[in-house]
Image: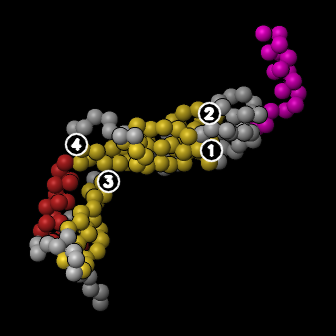
Amino acid sequence: HLRNENQMLWLYRGANGVKTGYTDAAGRCLVSGAKKDGLQLVAVVLDSVYMWNDSIKLLDYGFAHVEPDTIVHEGDTVGYASVAGGTGRKLPLKVAETLTLAKLKGEGEAYKTRIEADGLRAPIKEGDVVGRLVVERGGMEVASTDLLAGADVTRRSFFLTVWNFLRSLVKG
């Protein structure tokens, strides 16, 4: 027989935790979480006589005013990078995981992305971690995911290196 003090688990649809508590300084406290339509919200109530009702109101307000914003999906190609010592073609950069963040309903683009994938050298195997995709809001980093190599890049042979050098002399 298990007993849980967090009544939110059966009072609120989608509730998935988190913790009840009490301290002299903060009084009766509740940190509650709920997930709905792919969006996870957390409400924190301190020194509240009506902590269950207050938490429900906070979560209802959050779900009424916030929506999920999927920035990228796992496997999306988000850019290309040069690889030193490679065979010359650009390396596709793929995101390792789906990133979904919250934004206010009706708000336009809330986030900007930036690719960090510098100093790549051959050889590279498809699936190797080669950088990061950084998500920013207001100039602050709010999330990131690994960037994976979307293809193999072999090391350029000595013959091909000499050949490319000679071709550049003829063109130049």
- Write down the quadrant of residue 72 in the picture: top left
Q: How far apart are marks 2 and 3 (CA)?
A: 32 Å
- Front in this rendered view, residue 137 or 152: 137
Which residue is disc 1 drawn over? 130
Which residue is disc 3 drawn over? 38
State which tag comes first along the sequence, 2 or 3: 3
Circle on res. 98: none
Q: Specify the quadrant that holds the N terminus.
A: bottom left
Q: Please tell me whether mark 3 or mark 1 is closer to you in this view.
A: 1
| Residue pictured at 59% horizontal, 32% vertical | 80
Which residue is disc 2 drawn over? 81
Q: Does the magenta stretch include residue 167?
A: yes
Looking at the image, residue 85 sits to the left or right of residue 3; the answer is: right
State which tag comes first along the sequence, 3 or 1: 3
At numbered mark 2, what does the secondary structure look like: helix, strand or loop?
A: strand
State which tag comes first along the sequence, 2 or 4: 2
- Write down the quadrant of residue 116 in the picture: top right
| Residue pictured at 37% horizontal, 42% vertical | 137
